Amino acid sequence: MMDKFYFYKNRIFADDGVDKKLVYHYTSPDNFLSILKNGKLWFSDCQFMNDRSEYVYIKDVYKEAIKGTFLARQYNLLDYALTPYSSKGLVIKDKYSASKNEMIIETQKTVPMRYYILCASLEPDIHSLWSYYSKNNHYQGYNLGVDVNLLVDSISKSVITTAANIIHGEVVYDRETQVKQINEIIKEIDEQYNITEQKKTSKILDDKYKSILAIAIRQRCMFFKNPAFAHEKEYRFVVEAPYKKIDLEGTMAKLDFHIGPSGLIVPHLEIPFDLEAIEAISLAPMMEREVAEQGIKIFLGNYFKKEIIVKFSQIDLRY
């Protein structure tokens, strides 16, 4: 039986009652064509997405949450909780034949894992997100409106034979809420492991408890961002998966690399998905709307059987 903390698997962290059927993945024209032609999405390694300031911000939130508690003295727990990697024990099954009799031999293997992220937004028409895909003062981006449930089901099938863990939900920007959620995780796991105040003050803590707590906090913090970015209304899909190609064998996911904006080599997962998860496509604010509309209609007619809603940004352009 899995430890209780794995209730975070596939959990939507956002508040109840909000319509999350569609979220919007903003991308460049080249990536837009690649996604639709190849039916694959790129999930970038989280360590190469988050700048240093985001790491410092999350660290400060964690310190605020545990201030005055016994966890404030667990310095190694903080470092472990904020690392972008983990490991999992997998059972590998092999067939062994002897004297015409086959038997299954199970061996334990520890697989190094990392976290890969796909970013989307709850809103289909945000000026700041379109601005990432501008060139010579002209906007050139697209976004894909995807059904959350269909997308998660689809990518789950692509990585199903690994220890992959898929988490998705709204990014939280309010600092008070962030602190509260960390404290809720600590309280829930304390209850699960019967961590009494006496055990805390005795400084004798079970290693398994500390590991589970650190991983749970790490996964939750991947959905925290500085309030300055609240206008992005981000929705994230996070996949915990092996970072060695050999450990992805037997799945449809592929580990590859690309050159990031700053010239760094960035690892990413290419994960096949069902194009039926796409419900709508939005185009950045642009002047040549008629020509753009003709181009996208001809393209979609060759790649989709169902009708896709196509919208243009309603943001006014002023040159």
Image: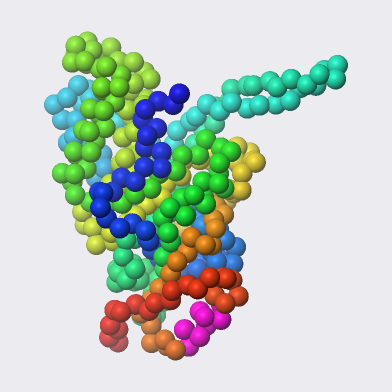
Locate the N terminus and report the quarter of the image it occupies: top left
- Judged by its main secondary structure, the magenta piece is helix
In the image, residue 163 above or below residue 157: above
Q: Nearer the viewer, residue 122 or 55?
A: 122
In the image, residue 199 above or below residue 278: above
Find the magenta span and give its range: 291-299
Q: Position of residue 108 (x, y in %)?
A: 59, 22
Residue 298 falls in image quadrant: bottom right
Horizontally, residue 316 falls left or right of residue 198, namely right
In the image, residue 180 above or below residue 171: above
Would you say residue 292 sits in the magenta stretch?
yes
Q: Nearer the viewer, residue 60 or 251?
A: 251
Would you say residue 91 sits in the magenta stretch?
no
Q: Position of residue 216 (x, y in %)?
A: 34, 33
Identify the residue at image location x=30%, y=41%: 221
Q: Position of residue 124 (x, y in %)?
A: 34, 68
Q: Position of residue 249 (x, y in %)?
A: 64, 41
Identify the residue at image location x=27%, y=17%: 194
Residue 122 falls in image quadrant: bottom left
